[in-house]
Amino acid sequence: EAQVTQNPRYLITVTGKKLTVTCSQNMNHEYMSWYRQDPGLGLRQIYYSMNVEVTDKGDVPEGYKVSRKEKRNFPLILESPSPNQTSLYFCASSSRGGPYEQYFGPGTRLTVT
Amino acid sequence: DAKTTQPPSMDCAEGRAANLPCNHSTISGNEYVYWYRQIHSQGPQYIIHGLKNNETNEMASLIITEDRKSSTLILPHATLRDTAVYYCIVRVENYGQNFVFGPGTRLSALP
């Protein structure tokens, strides 16, 4: 089954404790992206990757890092999480070949205390 | 990308067609209309997209006006499982470009 998976699905952590949220897709998609969703603010893009070793900032990149060493994986790293990063996070992927609709993962609900 | 305007909420009776409108009066010639939906806090799900012709797939139909300034997503037989937030997005069909999700329309399918 074609899918985007994220782990963990739920995470409660404390300020400053580094964490990684993993994202993996099995569709051989070149493009991958991370979004965060907050009440009243909709989905906002954090980082995206056009292909292996190619990443770029989205609209709200501060406090986040990403890497793309393999085509299928696109982890989101919070080096020193803060309470304002409490949010619902989604990973998405799409193909280079069009029609460019994005496939989203199930989401990771992160709480930073 | 052109801005879209959608009603914040709508109700529809289960079993009836749900017609969700979207205004995009500033759409340009190379911009497509995409529809996604998000059920509760799940990841957004692609529904359909089109440029100027009407489109239909197993989930829905998309009707785009001749001047392309508005469109309607039609769910032919709404069920309780169609209760979700529906997003209309206008963007150039371009690899790698961000999708900008607005507030969408919260559709409630009622028994």
Image (cartoon, coloured by chain):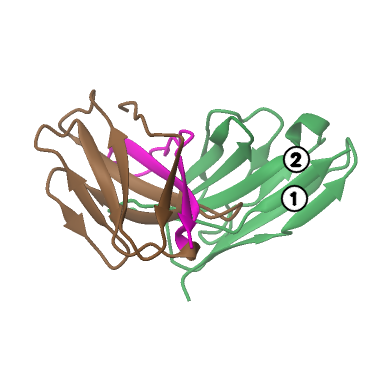
Chain colours: A green, B brown
The answer for which chain carries disc 1 is A
Which of the two residues, A81 or B51, is positioned nearer the viewer here? B51
Q: Quadrant of residue A23?
A: bottom right
Residues tagged 2 and 1 counted as in contact (Cβ below 8 A): yes
Q: Residues within 10 Å of mark 2 (few under 14, many from 20)?
A: some
Tell me, yes or no, if residue A51 can be seen here: no
Instruction: Identify the residue under disc 1.
Output: A20
Task: Work out which residue is located at the far top of the displayed protein and give it.
Answer: B26
Question: Mark on residue A52?
Answer: none
- Residue A75 painted magenta: no
The answer for which chain carries disc 2 is A
Which secondary structure lies at badge 1?
strand
User: Which of the two labelled residues, at mark 2 and mark 1, occupies the earlier sequence position?
Assistant: 1
Whole-percent x and y of residue B20?
33, 45
Whole-percent x and y of residue B102?
46, 33
Q: Which residues are magenta?
A: B82-111
Q: Amino acid at mark 2?
A: Leu
Q: Is residue B17 above or below residue B53?
A: below
Q: Is residue A28 above or below residue A21?
A: below
Give the alpha-carbon distance from disc 2 to disc 1, as whole Å: 6 Å
Instruction: Identify the residue under disc 2.
Output: A78
Q: Quadrant of residue B65?
A: top left
Task: Report the quarter where the N terminus of chain B lies.
Answer: top left
- Residue B102 painted magenta: yes
Which of the two residues, A7 or A41, is positioned nearer the viewer here? A41
Q: Is residue B60 above or below residue A86?
A: below
Whole-percent x and y of residue A97?
28, 56
A15 left or right of B86 in image? right
Q: Amino acid at mark 1?
A: Thr
- Which residue corresponds to the image point at 64% horizontal and 34% vertical from the top-left? A39
